[in-house]
Amino acid sequence: MRIASSSWWLLLPCLVQLLSSDLVRGMTINRRIELREEVREMFKHGFEGYMTHAYPADELKPLSCIPSYRDPDVGNFGINDIHANASMTLLDTLSTLPDILPQEFPGALEKVAKGISFNQDVKVQVFEMTIRALGGLLSTYQYLESLPVAPQDQAKTLGLKQREVDVKVFQPRILELALDLGERLLPAFRTSTGIPFARVNLRYGVEAGESEETCTAGAGSLILEFGVLSRLTGDRRFEDVARKAYQAVWDRRSPHNLLGNTIGAEHGQWLAPGMSGIQAGMDSYFEYAIKGAILLGDDTYLDIFDDAYAAIQTFVRTNDGFIYRPVQFRTLQIAAPSTVDSLSAFFAGVQVLNGDLESAIRNHLVHWNLWRRYSGSPESWTWSNRDLHWTGWPGRPEFVESTYYLYQATRDPFYLRVGERVLEDIQERVRTKCGFATMKDVETGELDDRMESFVLSELFKYLYLLFDPSEAESPTNRVFSTEGQTLSLPPSLCRPTRHGSPSVKTPGRTCPAYVPPTLNGLTVGIEQRLDYEYARTIVYGPGVNGRAEETGNVHWSESGFCVVPSAPRYSVDIVLAPMNASSSEQQPAPPQIDDMNAFLSTRLTQHPTSGDFLLSDVSGVHMTVRWRHDNTGYDIATIGPHRVLPGQSVIVSDPLMEGFLPMPDPAANEVEFVDTHPPAEVIMRFSLLSGKEKQVILHAAGSTATFGRKFAESGSNNWGLGGGPVRLILPPNTDPSGCQRLGRPHKSVPEPYVFLLQRGDCTFFDKLVHAQKAGAVGVLVYDEPPSGMAGKTLPLLAMDEAILIRPSSGEEPADLVKATENTGMVFTTFIVGELIKRMIQVESKVLGVELMPVDEDMLGSSLSTAGQTVLGSKVKKEVGPREGKLALGEWVIWNLKIVDRPP
Ligand SMILES: *[C@@H]1O[C@H](CO)[C@@H](O)[C@H](O)[C@H]1NC(C)=O
Ligand SMILES: *[C@@H]1O[C@H](CO)[C@@H](O)[C@H](O)[C@H]1NC(C)=O
C-alpha cells in the first residue's frame, strides 16, 4: 500500500473532524423540545390516570387502575406513612401543574382548597407529610403569590385558553391548610432532645407507646418547609423546632464529624448499627444543610454543611473518588455488604450546588452506569461484587435530579442523552394503561401495583426541566425541596448571611466555572474523559459486556495497564511544629497543649477588618485544610477553635518556620502516596532522517508512562523533551510487541534509538526492560487495533481510539522500576503506530521521533480535569498567594502566608 506523503498530513484534520462531529452528537433544540413534550404527555397520562381512577384516595394502583388506601395492618409503614386520606398524589403534584399541565391547575387547586382536611385519625410520618404535603402547599402558595392580580393576566401567565381565571382567591386557604398541617405535626417535637418522633397521629398527636427511633434524614429535613411556613405566617414555632431538631442531631456527631443513621428521639443516643454515609436514612440531612443556607440565609447550616461534606469526602468516599459507601460512624469500619443505593444519587446534585463539579461528575457516572446496566436504578447494589442487593425501582427521581443539576452546571449534551435513555426506559418498562408502576425487579422487569406520588412531582418534573430549553430568571435563593417542590423567599423575609449564599458569586465563596475536558486541543465531552471507562468498569466489571458497549473498545482494564484514578484527600489535619530544614528526619514531636484557647490567645490575633489570622508561634497549633473545588490545592478551614472563612488568610510570622511546614503523617491520615510521575502529555514530531533536509511528516500526541524516564524534566540531547530526533527502529517481525528479549540493532544504527512496539502480550514494564537491555533509550508503544479492525485496512480513526492511556508499571517492585529510570516510554494510538510502522517497513524510510512539550493553549485542561492525572505539575505553574514552602505534596495551601515579620 502506498500513501502519498502529503496524505499523512490528513491525519490530524481527520481527528479534528471526528472529534467535532462527536460534539455535534449533542442534541438539537427541536429534539429537546420533542422530548420535553413527551415528558408532558407522560405526566398527563399519570396525572389523569390518578384523577380518573384514584382521586380522592392518596395514591393510584397503576396495574389494576383502582385507588390505593391505607393498609389495615398498622405496621405497614411503607403504605401508611404517606396515606393520610388527603389526596397525597394531588397535593404533591399541585405545584408542578402550572409548569407542565397548566390547564389542570385551576381545577386541581380548587379540589385541594375545598376538599382536603388534615383532621384525620391517621398515624403518618412527619418527614413524608412535611416534604410531600406541606412542601406542596407552600410551593403552591408561593406560585400563587407570584401571579398577577387581574384574572385575564392570570390566564395569560398560566397560558390558558380561557380568557380569564382567578386562582389567587385560593391563596389564603392554601396557607391556612399549610398552617393547620404544621400545627398537627408539632406534637412530634415534644421530646427531651428536640429530635422529633418519626410518626404522629394527625388528630391525636403522638400515640402512647410510639417508637422513639427516628432517622437522621427524617429529623433533619424539615427546616426548609418549616422555615418557609414560619417566615410566611410570622409564627416562629415551626422554624424554631425544626432548627433545634437539626442542631440536636449535629450535636451528636462523632469526632470525625460523621452521623449515624438512626437515633432515639427521647434519649438522644445513636442506635445500632450506626452506619454513616449518604444513603437512605441520612441523605436529605446534608441536602437541607446547603439548601437551608441558600434559602433561609442561616450560616449555621453552611458551617454544618462544610464540616459534614468534608467528613463525607474524607471517610465515606473511596480513594478513587467514585463510590460513597456506608461506614460505621465511630470506627470507620466499612459496611458489609458495602452498597450504593439509588437514593444516594441525589448527592451529585448537592455537590453541584457546592461547586464540587469534579466529584459530582464522578459520582453521577457510577449511577449512570447502574442505570444503563439495569435500565432502572436498583434500590441497593453491592459494588464489591457488582450485584443487586435490593432489586426494585419505585420511580425514584434522584438520578434524574442530579442529571438535571449537572446539565445546568456543564451544559454537556451527554446529560441530555442520559435523560433520553431514562425516558425511553420508563416508557418501555413501567408505563401502564392508567399510570406508571413501580419496578419490583430491575432485572426481570416485574412490576408492583403502586405509583408513588414522587413519580409525577419529581421524576417527571426533573425530566421536564432537563429538556426544557427556556431559561427562566429565578430568584437566587430558590431551591428545590427534597421532594422537588420549588421554594424561595422574598428579600424581605431573608436574613443577611455572613458568607453570601453559595449559589451566588461572592468574593468569599465562589463556584469554580466548569472547564470541559479537552483532547488534542479540542473541547470534548464527559464521555471522552479518561475515567469514563473506569466508571463503566466499576459497574460492569472487566470485559465488554453490557448493552452500552457499542464500540467494544475498552480503554480501562483492571489487568494493571491503567492507573486507578485517585482523588486527593479532601480534608487533612495538620499540627504545626517548627521544622529544621537541614534535618528533616528528626523532628521534635509537637508539644501537647491542654488549653488551646488560652495558648492561642497570646499567639493568634485576628485582623478586625480583613479577618486574617496572624500566628506568631506555631508550636502545637492544630489546623484543618480542605480541598479547593477548582482543583488547585487546599485552604485552611480551621485554626485551633476558629473557623477560617473564605477570603481570610492565616499569616504565620514565627521565625522558626523558615518557610516550611511539616508533612502530615501519611500513616495517620491513610493517605496513599503513589510514586508516579506527574502527567506529561507530549507532541511527537516524526521526521525523515535520510536525505539532506529534515522533513517532518507527522505530528501526533503521546502520553508518557508513570515510570521510567521523567520526560518533563529531561532536556538533554537524548530521548527527552526538546532533545532532538531519536532514531525509531522496529523489533523483529516475530516479536512486534517486544515481549521476548530484544536484540541489539546492527552496529550501523546510530545511537540513541528507541523501539516502536505494539501494545499487549506482556506488561509495559517488560517492554521497557527489554528495550533497555537492548541498548535503547526508550520505547514508543502504540495501542492495539480497535476490536473488529484487526487485519483490515487502516480504519479511519475511531473516536475512542484518540484517548491515550498512561502506562503504569503495574505490580513491579520499586527497586526494579527504579532500574529503568533512564529509559523512557511514550504511548500513542494505534493509527499513529501503524502509519509509522508502514512508513519504515513498506516505504523503507528512516524515521526519527522528537518529543516536544504540549502547547498549553492546545491541550488546555484535559489533563487536570481527567481523574487520574489530577495530581501533577499544574501547581507549579500557578501563581497565587504562595509564600514559603508548602507541605501537602505539590499542593499549595492558598490562604496561608509565611512572612518574616508581621505585616
Ligand atoms: C377521609 O376524609 C374524608 C373527608 O376529609 C372523610 O369524610 C372520610 O371519612 C375519611 N375517610 C377515612 C377512611 O378516614
Ligand atoms: C538544624 O539542624 C542542624 C543539624 O542537625 C543543626 O546544626 C542546626 O543548628 C539546626 N538549626 C536549628 C535552627 O535548630
Image: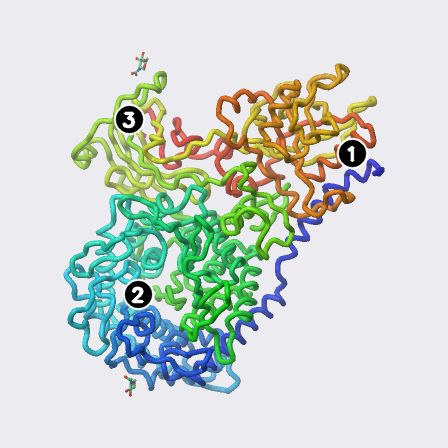
Which numbered mark, 2 or 1, is in the foreground of this view?
1
The circle drawn on residue 617 is: none
SS at mark 1 in the image: helix
Label 2: how many Cα within 10 Å (few below 14, some 14–19, many 20+): some
- Residue under the image location 49 percent in, 56 percent down: 370
User: Along the horizontal axis of the image, is 245 left or right of 294?
Assistant: left
Q: Is mark 3 within 8 Å of ligand 2?
A: no
Three-letter amino acid code of the residue under disc 2: Leu
Label 1: how many Cα within 10 Å (few below 14, some 14–19, many 20+): some
Count of numbered marks: 3
User: Along the horizontal axis of the image, is 672 left or right of 642?
Assistant: right
* Among numbered discs 3 and 2, the one appearing first in the sequence: 2
The quarter of the displayed image where residue 688 is located: top right
Q: Are marks 3 and 2 in contact (CB under 8 Å)?
A: no
Which residue is more in the foreground, 274 or 229? 274
Three-letter amino acid code of the residue under disc 3: Ala
Taking the image in four quarters, ligand 1 sits in the one at bottom left
Residue at the spot of label 2 = 493
Which numbered mark, 3 or 1, is in the foreground of this view?
1
- Residue under the image location 78 percent in, 34 percent down: 838
Which residue is more in the foreground, 77 or 570? 77
Residue at the spot of label 3 = 577
How far across and down, in percent of the image, does residue 600 sit?
21, 34
Distance of label 3 from label 2 (alpha carbons): 47 Å
* Among numbered discs 2 and 1, the one appearing first in the sequence: 2
Q: The N terminus is located in which quarter?
A: top right
Asked if one can make out residue 346 in the rendered structure from this viewpoint, the answer is: no
SS at mark 2 in the image: helix
SS at mark 3 in the image: loop
How far across and down, in percent of the image, does residue 128 sit?
32, 69
Q: Is residue 600 above or below residue 255?
A: above
